[in-house]
Image (cartoon, grey):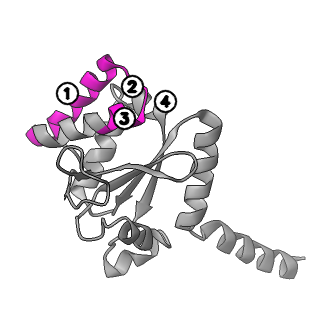
Amino acid sequence: MRIILLPLLLISMTLFSQQHTTDEILKEARGLASKENKKVFVIFHASWCGWCHKMDTAMNDPVCKKYFDDNYVIRHLTVYESKDKKDLETPGALELLTKYKGNDLGIPYWLIFDADGNLVADSKIRPANAATDTEGNNAGCPATENEVKFFIDVLKQTSSIDNKGLKTIYDRFRQNEIH
């Protein structure tokens, strides 16, 4: 009996430890977004990235969390890990980051998709009315006044967050520059 259980245990451990691919993560997120009438908010991050942690902390702050949770299915894709932590990287994430020309802009870098997988916004700050293929600077984790204003404009375009909520998010993200 033990001879049979040991291989089964090893196989099940391997299956549970396998990391999901970017395609699998996005497919699941799009399905949930479609069902819940939300957008998909994808954040590229790494374990060592301080600004990535600040972004997560701000979005998960109790004053902001409900606004994000009510409007977005948020998923993280891990990129740019150190050699000893490469196993943390999400398979296919760097390719997606490169596809949307964020691979040279630093992290966190974020993309917002509709439930059908169409890109509706990204973290590039561009001149007003510029096309989405116009190059821009990465807002990353918004902190400066310009970055946070840009972030709020993106949230206005991609969510149903009311003005009170947008002000709350603005105030919380401005704290990132101070701390």
Say if mark 4 contacts mark 2, CB within 8 Å: yes
Tell me: residue 122, above or below residue 67: below
Mark toward the start of the polypeptide (3 vs 4) = 4
* Residue pictured at 49% horizontal, 29% vertical: 70
Q: Secondary structure at mark 3?
A: helix
- Which label lies toward us, 3 or 4? 3
* Residue pictured at 49% horizontal, 41% vertical: 39
Q: Amino acid at mark 2?
A: Ile
Residue designated by label 2: 161
Which residue appears farthest toward the left when viewing the image?
Answer: 178
| Mark number, residue 70 | 4
Per the model, the C-alpha gap separating discs 3 and 4 is 15 Å
| Mark number, residue 171 | 1
Mark toward the start of the polypeptide (1 vs 3) = 3
First to last magenta residue range: 154-179
The percent position of residue 22, horizontal first and vertical second, equals 52, 65
Q: Secondary structure at mark 4?
A: helix
For the C terminus, the quadrant is top left
Q: Is residue 36 left or right of residue 177?
A: right
Say if mark 1 contacts mark 2, CB within 8 Å: no
Residue designated by label 3: 157
